[in-house]
């Protein structure tokens, strides 16, 4: 199947991503959860993906959505805020695969387009796209839950 070319990605509003703070009196389980998914959105946001054929996909991140901020080996780039919005919406697609019709590669292509839109160098964005593709193929289950 031929892939539709992505024309543009548009962020409706800034999700105001913050780091989740660990509190002194929290139990170990809550601290573990916060360390695994370190980031939270403080405002709802929508990413619209426009395709060359005139179709579009809307991805929604609710206020209070927690995510890991990019599963990058050894924490490379973990604090780089240019990566956070693309990582946020990639996690949205991973959490609800039906948003992109269970198409792992489409999720990776949207991630790459979002990286470029956020100012990441095209070559670095392509390397990150390849890394995400490899990680998803090896470690993630993208089969339809109905199968």
Image (tube, rainbow, N blue to C red):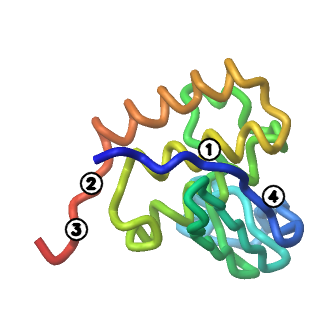
The answer for how far apart the CA atoms under marks 4 and 2 are is 27 Å
Q: Secondary structure at mark 2?
A: loop
| Pointer 2 residue | 141
Residue 40 location in percent, x, y?
74, 67
Left or right for 28, reference 69: left
The mark closer to the camera, 2 or 3, is 3
Left or right for 95, reference 81: left
Residue occupying image coordinates x 67% and y 50%: 7
Total numbered labels placed on residues in the image: 4
Residue 92 location in percent, x, y?
56, 66
Circle 4 Cα neighbour tier, 10 Å, few/some/many (<14 / 14–19 / ≥20): some
The answer for how far apart the CA atoms under marks 2 and 3 are is 9 Å
Q: Is residue 92 above or below residue 103?
A: below
Label at residue 70: 1
| Pointer 4 residue | 19
The answer for how far apart the CA atoms under marks 4 and 1 are is 13 Å
Mark 1 or mark 3, earlier in chain = 1
Circle 3 Cα neighbour tier, 10 Å, few/some/many (<14 / 14–19 / ≥20): few
Q: Secondary structure at mark 3?
A: loop
Tag 1 and tag 3, C-beta contact below 8 Å: no
Tag 3 and tag 4, C-beta contact below 8 Å: no
Mark 3 or mark 4, earlier in chain = 4
The mark closer to the camera, 4 or 1, is 1
Please name whichever residue, 133 or 141, is drawn nearer the observer in this view of the structure.
133
The answer for how far apart the CA atoms under marks 1 and 3 are is 23 Å
Residue 141 location in percent, x, y?
26, 54
Residue occupying image coordinates x 66% and y 58%: 88
The mark closer to the camera, 1 or 3, is 3
Residue occupying image coordinates x 35% and y 56%: 103
| Pointer 3 residue | 144
């Amino acid at each position: 199947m031929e892939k539709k070319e992505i024309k543009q990605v548009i962020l409706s509003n800034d999700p105001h991503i913050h780091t989740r703070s660990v509190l002194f009196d929290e139990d170990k389980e809550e601290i573990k959860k916060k360390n695994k998914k370190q980031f939270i959105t403080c405002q709802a946001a929508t990413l619209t993906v426009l395709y060359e054929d005139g179709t579009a996909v809307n991805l929604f991140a609710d206020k209070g959505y927690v995510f890991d901020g990019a599963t990058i080996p050894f924490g490379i780039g973990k604090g780089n805020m240019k990566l956070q919005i693309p990582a946020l919406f990639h996690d949205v697609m991973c959490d609800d695969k039906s948003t992109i019709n269970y198409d792992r590669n489409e999720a990776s292509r949207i991630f790459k387009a979002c990286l470029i839109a956020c100012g990441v160098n095209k070559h670095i964005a392509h390397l990150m796209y390849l890394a995400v593709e490899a990680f998803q193929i090896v470690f993630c289950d993208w089969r339809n839950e109905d199968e």
